[in-house]
Image (cartoon, helix red, strand yellow):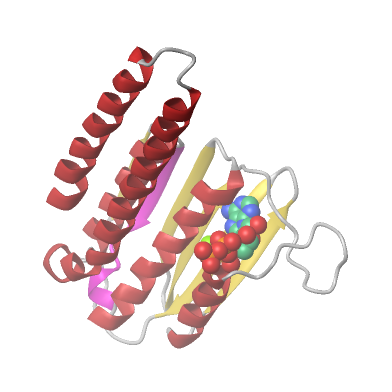
Amino acid sequence: MELHDELGQNLTVLKLQLRSIQKTLPPDQSHLQGKCEGANRYVDQIIENVRRISQELCPTCIEDLGLDESIAMLVEDFALHSKLIVSIETQKIDSLFTLQQRTMIYRIFQEALNNIQKHALARKVWIKIERKKKAVDIQIADDGKGFVRDRNAEENVVKAGLGLTAMEERARMLGGTIEVFSIVGIGCRLAFNIPITAGERNDEFLSYSFG
Ligand SMILES: Nc1ncnc2c1ncn2[C@@H]1O[C@H](COP(=O)(O)OP(=O)(O)OP(=O)(O)O)[C@@H](O)[C@H]1O
Ligand SMILES: [Mg+2]
């Protein structure tokens, strides 16, 4: 969190300083203008990397905070940075899974939200975590540009990146399934069904929204 908040803040100040140097340059110094722009883009990359690294460290906090709280923090951070409207409706699921399973579920959320930020051009995101009798249903939907995922089709094909494949692999390792529903121009919805193998029942509903 410190890495994210403090270093992120410092880098933003550095960006502002670079910009003010750039403003004082005479217009004929195009070479230096270009260098300043290059440096600015580089700082953007560092800011993104710090965010990514602090996210990757977070699974260690699943142990302390639990999965429910960790997902809530991830979603809140996502809403803040993406400026998307995010609504989430959840039931507590932390006690249903082992630490390893919880980490996998957390990673699924990370990748789904990363994809929305990277590709979707969405305005709204809906997240639902539902505790059923024998399984947990998770839905992550956006109203973005959507995509066609047909490895054989000629047009509109998206190359299968690591993210979707990793999500499928994690769903499989959890003994569950993932379904991708997407319509070009309408959005995308990921639906996970993860069987509960152990744990206790807790039906409490939590509902909140950001943005
Ligand atoms: N929510 C989404 N909205 C629109 N397009 C999406 C969405 N999620 C995935 N895609 C499309 O599916 C492709 C594959 O996604 P995937 O996560 O597998 O790879 P990636 O994000 O491109 O790269 P990586 O995850 O390996 O960094 C993306 O390149 C993108 O075109
Ligand atoms: Mg991805």
* Residue at 60 percent of width and 69 percent of height: 161
* Residue at 38 percent of width and 44 percent of height: 42
Residue 92 visible in the current orientation: yes
Residue 98 visible in the current orientation: no
Q: Position of residue 211 (x, y in %)?
A: 38, 31
Q: Position of residue 15 (x, y in %)?
A: 30, 31
In front: 44, or 40? 40
Left or right of 4, for residue 144: right
Q: Against 87, is 54 above or below? A: below
In front: 138, or 107? 107
The furthest residue to the right? 154
- Residue 174, quarter of the rendered image: bottom left
Q: Is residue 181 magenta?
A: no
Q: Position of residue 116 (x, y in %)?
A: 53, 50
Q: How many marks?
A: 0
* Residue at 37 percent of width and 16 percent of height: 25
In front: 112, or 48? 48
- Residue 40, quarter of the rendered image: top left
Query: Quarter for ligand 1?
Result: bottom right
Q: Is residue 89 magenta?
A: yes
Instruction: Give the extent of the magenta segment.
Output: 85-96
In front: 122, or 66? 122
Q: Position of residue 103 (x, y in %)?
A: 30, 74
